[in-house]
Amino acid sequence: MDTTILKLRGMSCAACANNIEQAIRRVSGVAEASVNFGAEQATVTYDLQRTDLEAIQEAVYEAGYSAFSLPELERVTGEDDAEKTARMAESQALTRKIWLGSAIGAVLLIGSLPMMTGLHLPFIPSWLHNFWLQAVLTAPVQFWCGRSFYINGWKALKRHTATMDTLIALGTSAAYFYSLFVTINPGFLTAQGLMPSVYYEVAAIVITLILLGRLFENRARGQTSEAIRKLMGLQARDARIIRNGREMEVPIAEVQLGDIVAVRPGEKIPVDGEVIEGSSTIDEAMVTGESVAVKKQAGDEVIGATINKTGSFKFRATRVGKDTFLAQIVELVQQAQGSKAPIQRLADQVTGWFVPAVIAIAIATFVIWFIAMGSFTLALITMVEVLIIACPCALGLATPTSIMVGTGKGAEHGILIKGAESLELAHKIQTIVLDKTGTLTQGQPTVTDFITTGGTANSHELRLLQLAASVEQNSEHPLGEAIVRYAQSQEVTLEDVWGFEAIVGSGVQGRVSEQSIQIGTQQWMQELGIITQGLQPDQEQLESLGKTVILIAIDSELQGLMGIADALKPTSNQAVRALKRLGLEVVMMTGDNRQTAETIAREVGIDRVFAEVRPDQKAAQVYKLQSEGKIVAMVGDGINDAPALAQAQVGIAIGTGTDVAIAASDITLISGDLQGIVTAIQLSRATMRNIRQNLFFAFIYNVAGIPIAAGILYPLFGWLLSPIVAGAAMAFSSVSVVTNALRLRNFQPKTLT
């Protein structure tokens, strides 16, 4: 299966999005399709063996729209921004039509004032009252400015569907052609005792107002992608590479894997790579959020778009183009902005039947008023009002615009949200499970105590350290790395190991110089039948101090132990307090023994602890919490956390952790700062509050607007809604929803202590 994102053109409302989605899903080989009206893009998952991108694009074209692939990220992050150019061209075209429509609409409105007010207004030239002049003036607005409504409406009709363009085309055409009929045959109304009335100004002004609304909407949508543009702007434009012994400056798109890149003080690092010569300090705040510059030297990784501060150095390019860290962030944000939140399904279901229902209501309105009042004019006006005021656009924009702004705002705060569903779920979290090592703690444990059965400061201790470190050099566990670092600090030479084996959640073992070495937990030692009572008092004392104790046995006999401490992150205490202030239950989960785990938990203020949990049991512990009826988030950074991250409703990975953990998560904190969890939840709550406001406005607008347009107040107060006011209200509804969504751009996390 392959997943691609298509940029769409030609949509005018949420009904269009539904039509495209159905057309794509009918293509054989398409497994899933999601069309986001607000983002104007489709996310499609399809089988490469059964279909291809061209077939999907053809299906969109046959549905009456166009689709094209998003450009490669190396092009997106460069100077060329095709989407921005297309949006500007669309805005310019709309502006020209609006100016023409406004000018003609103003003239028609002035000419219609005597008829509308019933007053003699001598300052208005009599020739402006001429019906034929009004018909000629209205024609370019109706058929040039409003041309897209006819084209899209006709396309929808051929597909046996209806869209917002259908309603606008029907409503304005009814006003225009009725007026043209009266202009040609005024005696028809006179014979019925009615004053000949025309509504040319209605058709012209309604079209102009709707186009004005689309212009505002188009510009506002451009602002929802501001976060993407900010991320793209971080990228360097050029790189200084060394080829064939010569230094040259090339565009960033021309940098290849393996190229040697030279960086001077104050320059942006163009791509990801590994330092091979020189040293410097790098400001990585733009990517990681960390304000303190990081020292880099030979062998260290550098990230594209970060800033070189002090020294000059050379590095080898290891990731270029769409594979760079920044490009992957951009891609994740794009995918998230194009995804659908579950709450949007309600709006999608409504818009699916909305337009046909509005047409039916409009026809019924005409028939009822014509029969009840015998007035063709009254029946026509109320029908036109219903067609014009009905607006599924607001419903279609309510959710995606907020999601786009919310996910973009998350990226600005170093929080990568993989999809709209994750953003929505985050506000429902009841319990949050924090892994200890690398999440609450720094993730770089240090040996603080080394106790042997033969005492300290002797050859027995050094030999035991040599054997233990020799075995642990094959381990990838942070505790094993701490033992190796400690041995290296003692200038101990490591030996070769045979038969190395890592027992998940227990320890490691191997053979060195015909001796069998086991290093691990007390529980594992006891399972192996090794007596551990000899160092029990020392072990208990270290564990009471919150240290992790590792036992060392040689040939199945306990020889010593190590106390290993992993310092808490500076923000752990504050983050736990803030999570509790948000009303969340905070749980710590660790493989450490219970005494050590509870000591750490007390230090950060966590009441519930899952201790001595093996990696294969972590997912089961999350499931246990879920079986209590709780919505659970899991926060972790290691490979052993991946199953639990996937099991939780919301998996949150520390960005400084492993790629596997990040891939299994729904939300990634780039910097590793636990305050990001608090920010992510606050952002989710703010976004969902914004979406509910949008949906409320959209539903209330239509629930109240359509009956008023249908003339429900006329029998009581003799008052009818003007079609011009209906058009203005329709345009305002979409603009108000998008504008409300844009308020999220002002989101700032609250400090909770």
Image (cartoon, helix red, strand yellow):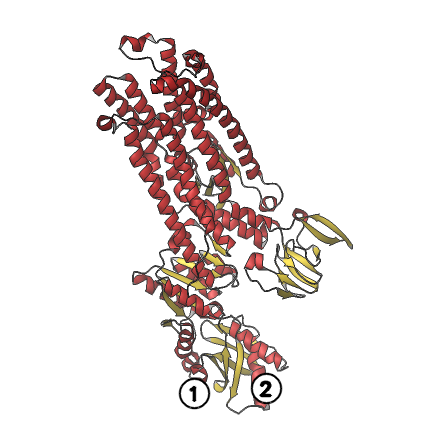
| Secondary element type, mark 2 | helix
Quick one: 177 or 303, which is closer to the camera?
177
| Residue 189: image location, x then y, percent | 30, 11
| Secondary element type, mark 1 | helix
| Residue 182: image location, x then y, percent | 36, 12
| Residue 610: image location, x then y, percent | 37, 71
- The residue beneath circle 1 is 536
Q: Tell me the kind of residue under disc 1.
A: Gln
| Residue 166: image location, x then y, percent | 39, 27
Q: Is residue 17 shown to the viewer in this render?
A: yes
Q: Local crowd at mark 1 within 10 Å, few (<14), some, or many (≥20)?
A: few
**89 relative position to 28: left or right:** right
**473 relative position to 20: left or right:** right
The image quarter containing residue 105 is: top left
Q: Local crowd at mark 2 within 10 Å, few (<14), some, or many (≥20)?
A: some
Number of numbered discs overlaid on the protein picture? 2
Query: Mark 2 to mark 1: distance in Å?
Result: 22 Å
Residue 707 - label: none
Q: Earlier in the sequence, mark 2 or mark 1?
A: 2
**314 relative position to 511: left or right:** right
Quick one: 303 or 54, which is closer to the camera?
303
- The residue beneath circle 2 is 462
Which image quarter is the C terminus in? bottom left
The image quarter containing residue 712 is: top left
Say if 699 sits above or below 355 in the image: below
